[in-house]
Amino acid sequence: MGQQYEHVRVAVIGSGFGGLGAAVRLRREGITDFVVLERADSVGGTWRDNSYPGCACDVPSHLYSFSFAPNPDWPRTFSGQEHIRAYLEHVTDVFGIRPHIRFGHDVLTMRWNTAELHWEIETSRGAFTADVVVSATGPLSDPKTPEIPGLDGFPGKVFHSARWDHDYDLRGKRVAMIGTGASAIQIVPSIQPLVAKLTLFQRTAPWVMPRMDRAIGAGERWLHRRLPLTGTARRGMLWGIRELQVSAFTKRPNQLGLIESLAKANMAKSIKDPALRAKLTPSYRIGCKRILLSSDYYPALARPNVDVVASGLTEVRGSTVVSADGTEAEVDAIVLGTGFRVTDMPIADRVVGAEGVTLAEAWKDGMESLRGATAAGFPNWMTIIGPNTGLGNSSMILMIESQLNYMADYLRQLDVLGGRVALGARPSAVHAWNRLVQERMKRTVWNTGGCTSWYLDASGRNTTIWPGTTGEFRRQTRTVDLAEYEVLRAPRTPAADQAAPGTGAVAAAVGEESA
């Protein structure tokens, strides 16, 4: 007996915002023949995995939630991890998604079967075939651990911010914090009062603006419950403000100088030591890296038990950590705030397309897709939060919902075409889309601001950020243009060919791919 496969129309990979959003949209489209394959034992994605002290969102709560599932009861303007995770559990139950989820199913391989026009999926707990795969593993799912000589021999505790060890007590310990990204600026003020000594290793100083967070009063929550339009209006206002900011990031980076002045004033308020202020002042244009929001990061750095080393960690000798400038510190624990594998997502090694190559091999010169969703050579496969769909100033939920519109129309097109059919993104369409995106990227702050960020891949190409407004992206992904796809049909039997002469084994319904 060979491998037993369970067949579904759609297999969704991951149960974070993207995967749960896809599952809800499938049900709303009347599609119930699907599974959500989740490697962990609960939903939540990055909001399940990141539970470090102080973990919270830097996008306002009413914008960082699904438009089809407004939450009138957000307790704060910027919600913490526990509230966002609870929201995702709530969405899972309210929309009846839980019966579709297969927990503990780590996807090992996804292989396209050209003859059968379906995907064969091997997981750690069973095998599936699916007509369509929606990959929603997300770019912030696999931590990036730096190659640091001697780290393996460190006698103390080492963990990544996304794999926080809650059993390890930091009180009274000497701690090294590696990195100054979005996680680190939340961790530092949360653990600073507890530890004996905190040494922060900073390769690049971030721009930090105040975080205008506050509790949302009972009256506000009552109003949003009783008059849902008030919540919709609040969300619309938050969205509109961010849409108006986009042109400064994408077309006129010089306009960001005023924001830099405000950020420097924010720093000067808490950092009185000129030497420390010099260390913490970035040398690149604000916005080139993600602008971070915190009102307690700078005050924490000014405390006497904190040292800022303006250099990256390069070596570990026993319990001594050594920076690139030679600074040494004795520590009991090392916390890695070193980000995620964004431009080389591990899932790409597990996806094998029509030509027998992996997605990682297809993307070896840089990730690229058609409208952030589909890749040439990988029929009936699409990704949520794909290449060049990230944002530098707004809510990723807006981009996810646009991609769900595209997914829904993709499935409708398959229905209209009828029979065993697949859509394969034309290489010419993929290249045309990416040429357009990269041309627009040239003048953005992310490419001209003078920094090296996680938005850029190994060759310095920005394959992460969308160089436009969320409204424009929504218009670009509202429907599937069949001219950008080859329509693939399964081989017909001899009897079927006699009944319907003139049909080929694999036919392109909308023209031939140009040479």
Image (cartoon, rainbow, N blue to C red):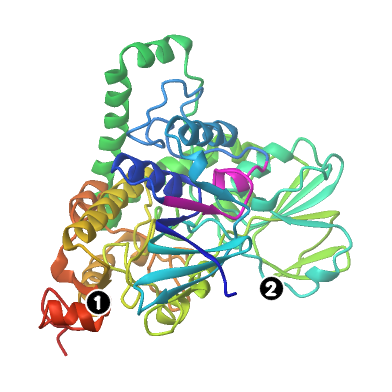
Residue 35 magenta: yes
Percent position (x, y) of residue 403? 31, 52
Crowding near the residue tagged with mark 2, few <14, some 14–19, many ≥20 C-alpha atoms within 10 Å: few
Instruction: Name the foreground residue: 178 vs 299.
Output: 178
**Residue 463, quarter of the rendered image:** bottom left
Residue displayed at 31% across by 76% down:
376
Percent position (x, y) of residue 157? 83, 56
Residue displayed at 60% across by 74% down:
1
> Distance of mark 2 from mark 1, alpha carbons?
34 Å
Q: Relative to residue 5, is residue 164 drawn left or right?
A: right
Q: Relative to residue 94, is residue 238 drawn left or right?
A: left
Q: Secondary structure at mark 1?
A: helix
The kind of residue tagged 2 is: Glu
Q: Relative to residue 285, is residue 243 drawn left or right?
A: left
Instruction: Name the foreground residue: 457 vs 501.
Output: 501
Per the rendering, the mark at residue 431 is 1
Residue displayed at 49% across by 28% down:
213
| 436 in relation to 405, above or below | below
Instruction: Name the foreground residue: 452 vs 263.
Output: 452
Per the rendering, the mark at residue 371 is none
| 129 in relation to 76, above or below | below
Percent position (x, y) of residue 500? 12, 77
Percent position (x, y) of residue 93? 49, 32
The kind of residue tagged 1 is: His
Q: Nearer the viewer, mark 2 or mark 1?
A: 1
What's drawn in magenta, residue-wise?
A: 34-52
In this figure, which residue is indicated by the disc labeled 2? 147
Residue 117 magenta: no
Residue displayed at 29% across by 61% down:
444
> Can residue 396 be seen by looking at this rendering?
no
Q: Earlier in the sequence, mark 2 or mark 1?
A: 2
